[in-house]
Each structure stands twice: as C-alpha cells, then as structure tokens.
Amino acid sequence: MSFNSVFLIYAIIFISILVYAGWMTRKWISGSNDFFIAGREVGLITNIFGVAAIGFAGTMITLIPGLAITTGLWGAIGFGLVYGFGGLALYGIIFAPYIRRSGAHTLSEWLEMRFDSKTRTLITITSILGLLGIMANNVISMAIVATGFTGWSLIGTLSIIFFMFLLFTYIGGFWAVTLTDFVQMCIGLIALPVLLITIISKYGGLNFINSNWPTDLSYWTNGHANGQMAVFSFQYPSILTFMVLFACFLVWGNNYYWLRVSSTRSESTAKKSFVYGAILLLVPTLILSYTGVYAGAIFPDFFAPTGEGDPMSAFGVVLRALPVAVAALALIGALAASISTSTTALIGASSTAVRDLYQRYVKPNATSKELTVPSKVITLFLGLLVWLLCFYPGGPLYLFAFSTAWLGPPSVLVFLGIWWKRTTVKGAFYGGLFGIGVTLLFTVLDLTNIFKIAQYTHIGVVGLVVTVLATVIVSLATTPNYYAVNNWNKAGKIDTNVSKQEKEILTFIHLGYKTMAEITDLLGVDSSVSNKLIESLDKKQLIRREKYSGPGFYTFQLSEPSLKLITLNQQDSLLAKDQLSVEDLNFLYYANNGQEALNSFLVEKDYDSIKASVILSKLIRQSYLKESGLLRRTVTISDMGKGLLDKYSHLISTIGEQKAK
C-alpha cells in the first residue's frame, strides 16, 4: 500500500476524532467561562497531558531534530530540559499556586488587579502579537516537516493545517482543545517510540551514528558543520538564551499557560500537572533528539555544509528511510502536535482579546453567556491574522524566538509582581513600556537591515534587561501600594462602614470561601472588581491576608470586628458552624441522589458553570464530596457528607418541599 493511501487512512481517523471532540464538547459550553477555561473543571491526568502536549508541538518536532544536526545531541536535549524544567516545572512550583488563587482568567486581567488598567491594556496588545506569532510558528513548522517528507506544496500544506486548527478551535473552545491535547499526547507516545525502534532496527544502535556522523568530532557535542551549543553566550542559540526565551518568556509570560492553571479543578491539580507534564515531556525530547542525530547520520550529504537541506526539516527527511506505515503514523503524530498547540495558542490570544479588550471596552456588563458568540467570532478573526505571520523571514527558528521576545515584559512583571511587593503601578507600566519599545525598535531595525543586534545578543535579552531595570528603578522612585508601606496597618483605625458587596464577601469568607478565585467566581465579576473590594476590606482591617507576597496574598481570613457585620438568617446561622450555607446543603442533597440529579438541579436553577465549580470544590475540600472524572468532573457524596445530611435532616425536608413546588 502506498504512503498516500496509508496516510489518508490515518488522516481520516484523526480528523474524525477532532470532529467528534468538537461536536461532543460544544454542548459543554454554556458561556465564555466554558469556552476559555472549561468552567475550572480540568482534572490532573488531563492537564498533565495538556501541559505536555503544549510542549510536544510542531515547534519541538522541528527545533529539536534540527538542533541535533546543527549543535549535536547535547544542544537538542539541552533545549528540551530548559523548556521542560526551567519553564514548565518551575512555573508549576513558583507561579501556579498564586495564579490559581488569584482567580484572574487571563494574565492581563491579573495585571490590572496587581497594578492598573493601563498596564493591562499595554500587555494585552503585545501578548496577542506574541501568541499569534507562536501559532504561526507551529503551523509553518508542521508544514516544513510535511513537505520535507512528501514534497508537497508549502502553501497547500499550510492551508490545510491552518483550516483544521482554526475550525476545530471555533467549534469547541478550550474543552475541545483539552480533549485533543489528551488524544495528541496518546498518539505521540505511541508514534515516537515506534519511530525510534524502527530506525534502530533498520540501521543499528549508537555505533551506526558514530560511524556515519559527517565530522571527526563527537555527535554529542558537535553538529554537522562542527557547530556547538554554547552555554553562557548572549548570542542565540545558547542555553542562556534558551532559558530567557523558552523558559522565562515562553512559559512565565504566556497567557495560554496561565489558562492551563485557571482551568484546573484545584491549586494542587495545577501545581502537580506542570511538574508531571515536564517529566512526561522527557519522552519526546529524548526520542526527537536521537531522531535528529540519526537523520544526520543517515543523510550526511543532505544537510549543510555539504548539502543545502534545511536542518529544521530533519524529522520529515528521516521518514523517507522508514516503512510507509511507520512514516505515516509519525507524520500524523506531528500533525496532531502542531494542531494541538496551535489551538491552545489561539485560545490564549482570543481569551485575552475578549476578556481584556472586548468585554472591558465594548460590552462591560455582558454575562458569560452573552460573550459566547463574540468569543467565537474574535477567535476566528485572530486565526486569520496568523496566516500573515506564517511567512516571517528566517523560518521557524527565528519566528519562534521573535514571538517569544514579545512575551518578555509580561514575564518580568509577573515575577516581580508576585514576589516583590515594592513593585509599583508606575514601575510596572514604564517597565513594560520601555521593554516593549526596545523590542519593537530592534525588531524594525533588524527587518529593515539597518542594524542586526543578533551579532551581539538576542533581542529578547535586551528586552529582559531593559524591563527589569526600568521596573525596579521607577518602582524605587515612586510610591508603592499601601501594603508595601511599613507598618501601614499598625496605627490605622478599624472601619466598619461596608458596602453591600463587601458585606457579601465577608459572608463568603465566613462560610469557607477564602481565596480570591472563589470570591471572584461567586460574585461573577472581573477580578479587577473583586480585587478593589478586597483591598478596601484589607485597608479597613476587616480581613487579613495570609501573606503579602506569593500565594498567601490571595488567601484571606476574617478579623474579629468583621464577625459583627455578618448577618445570617436562622438556617444559615445554624449551618455556618460547619462553614456551610443552605446553598451548599442543596448541592449535597442533590449529589446524594446521583450526578444526573445534581446536573438537572444546576440546569433548572440556571447555575453558571464556574459558580457551581466553586461550590463543589469547597465541598470536596471539606471532604463532604469525592470527585472523579477524566474530563468533566463527577462527584459522589462521602460518608461525612451523608452524616451532615443526617445532622441537618430537618432542613433537608425544606429542600424537598421546594423541589415539589
């Protein structure tokens, strides 16, 4: 059977899975909260695969084998380790707990919480530009891989891949992306080992590489043209610039990694999924690295300096030497990787555009349901802009570096904003502005061939240094927020004059909803709104933060005077002893009757998915419910929960009467 026939069979199966995923998940979308963050229902296993799937992308499939040829095996593996552990694992450990507690759906939304609306708008625009570039990079990377093997037209291949990822994202949103990420990693974890085993079976082990590597130097440290991967060089590529671009910038300052945290069921799920995702990513990193050196050994005359073949097409080139069935499976795995990460990047860009631009300036009072259609339209529009960036000069290696450079200022502001409470509003704005300005300036100079900064360092390194210096210097010269002033709460007078919403927040905390994420989701507002209310209560000394930097910044407890301001009816006063409300008891009652009964109750009462998720998460944390479910969360009542229903059986009868009515 010919390659075209086998590949067509695989492609039909894969496309059928995509269509089914989009069709199945579309009914899970009741509003923009579901479209962009899956109602905060994504579980641990699914998110581990989702995080790893972002890394196992068209970019990795192109760059790692290409780096193996140009810089040797060490350079290729070094790239994967920097991205996986310097980027993903550190993000899970250092940033994920803070992000999950903050409640901000997008990175830009958090920037207004921590700083102001000007900083939010500034970073929103540049983040969208960077994410669009990353999307384009994934599409063009996959097209290069495909054409390296098939000889197809680059424009035609681009068109097919582009249409597939755009249509799929439009239909199913983040739920569809999450499902296809899971499927993509499953395909990759089958296809890549089969690929490497087939290569070894046909050509032999490491002795074959040693005998056929087209240089006297070791393939471990040297590429075809004796190129080496520098460690501390400021010129790209090097381990240092990889750390700046593909750990700090690409991950820490990237909105779609933020979404991966926001969409999880809990803080623990978010943290573990990034650490385990980095470990899982070792599999494709090692296999792709060895695939690259095998490509260089099998086709020593194809790549520079003796040939004119692009090293970035190495993955596609090596498939020529393999049986049709294996080559087609590997190519489908690469296609899945490209589409998966492209759709994630598209969701990252469109969520920022909808939440941080459209909702704020066009429809500020729109509900999650009312934003569903605009979310899809904006997603479609941004996808079309990607087409232009697919033809960025220099190919995927430089397009990827260019795109991630724009994510530098946000990564700096996130790091300083979380861990240095002295960072001021003006410091963040001018740090971001100067960093972006310098990046833009040197990009224009490079594209117009006026000045090539690459001869000295990468543009991203310059942007990083400028952003850090400007942010720190301006922050030290300007007035910080109230909580960075020494002894701000020592001499202050307690103010018990509170608004209706502030009183509502005090009640939430009293009932066990202690993080900003829970409060924001229960109120159903933008995080910048709930943050102002929290800051007001903090200044009035009616609440206390666990800490004033790190994750504890968004964890609260009541001060003694605030307890006098909370008024509850008789039923809620009784339940409050167990940090419950009548609403919580309703959830337990219907959960006791099964998941279907609970779902019917949520539909009947028209619950927003994200509010329902908050209530369920608290009851799970209190051990009254147990959760399961690979994709959507399912809950069952625990023995403690049943005991609670028995304890308040006299109130349960009231719920039954309400149901009968």
Image (spheres, grey):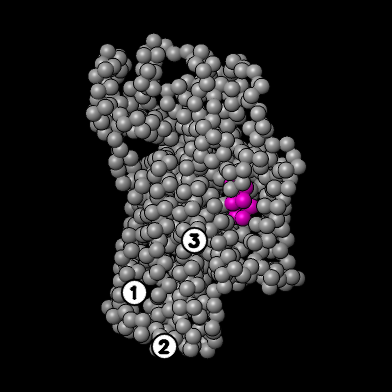
Q: Earlier in the sequence, mark 2 or mark 3?
A: 3
Image quarter (top left, top right, bottom left or bottom right) of the N terminus: bottom left
Disc 3 target residue = 83
Q: Say which residue appears at 40% left-offset and 75% top-offset.
A: 291
Chain part drawn in magenta: 407-414
Q: Say which residue appears at 69% left-offset and 64% top-offset.
A: 443
Q: Is residue 297 left or right of residue 345?
A: left
Q: Residues within 10 Å of mark 2 (few under 14, many from 20)?
A: some
- Secondary structure of the residue carrying tag 3 is helix
Q: Residues within 10 Å of mark 1 (few under 14, many from 20)?
A: some
Q: What type of secondary structure mainly makes up the magenta span?
A: helix
How far apart are the alpha carbons under marks 1 and 3? 22 Å
Whether the magenta-drawn stretch holds residue 337 is answered as no
**In this orientation, which residue lies closer to the viewer: 99 or 657?**
99
Disc 2 target residue = 212
How far apart are the alpha carbons under marks 2 and 1? 17 Å
- Secondary structure of the residue carrying tag 2 is helix
Tell me the mark number nearer the camera, choosing from 1 and 3. 3
Disc 1 target residue = 196
Say if mark 2 contacts mark 3, CB within 8 Å. Answer: no
Q: Say which residue appears at 38% left-offset and 54% top-offset.
A: 276
Q: Can residue 292 be seen at all in this image of the molecule?
A: yes
- The vertical placement of 612 against 418, above or below, is above
Q: Earlier in the sequence, mark 2 or mark 1?
A: 1
- The vertical placement of 218 against 399, above or below, is below
Q: Amino acid at mark 2?
A: Asn
- The vertical placement of 284 against 91, above or below, is below
